[in-house]
Amino acid sequence: MPGLGTNETEWGRPTPDRTLVAHMASGDRQAWNELRARYRATVYSIAYTALCEPEEAEAVAAGVFTEAWRGASTFLWTHASVSGWLTHLARKHVGSVRRNSTTVR
């Protein structure tokens, strides 16, 4: 719709998450920014709770949203919610950080 931002519908309601992912698959950076704004705190919280390191949690969050950007076109809507997908990506990235960590916790 002309004149409307990606983050709202014609009726002033927030754009559904799945619609944002579809826009991301088309290369819409504004949609990616909106999805990041919605879920950044959740993804960071998952990472921080598991890793207890703010820098590592930030790196995980950045990795999750980069992977979401790259994988938007292959996201299967019928198998998961967007929040579930992002949670899965966060846990996967946390596991990767743990496997690659050389420090003993």
Image: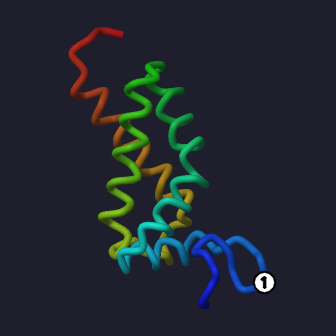
Look at 43% across and 41% down and name the residue there.
Answer: 61
Residue type highlighted by circle 1: Trp
The image shows a total of numbered marks equal to 1
Query: Does residue 46 appear to the left or right of 61 in the view shown?
Result: right
Look at the image and tell me in which quarter the N terminus lies.
bottom right
Above/below status of 97 relative to 15: above
Label 1: how many residues lie within 10 Å, few (<14), some (14-19) or many (20+)?
few
Kindly identify the residue that appears in the image at 56 percent across and 34 percent down.
45
Residue found 65% across the figure and 74% down from its top: 15
| Residue 17 place in picture, x, y as percent | 58, 69
Q: Nearer the viewer, residue 68 or 8?
A: 8
Quadrant in the picture for residue 74: bottom left
Q: Residue furthest front?
A: 3
* Residue on which disc 1 sits: 11
Picture quarter with the C terminus: top left
The percent coordinates of residue 10 (x first, y second) are 72, 86
Q: Nearer the viewer, residue 3 or 19?
A: 3
Pick whichever, 74 or 4, lies toward us. 4
In the figure, is residue 5 to the left or right of 80?
right
Q: Position of residue 80 (x, y in %)?
A: 51, 67
- 22 versus 87 height, above or below: below
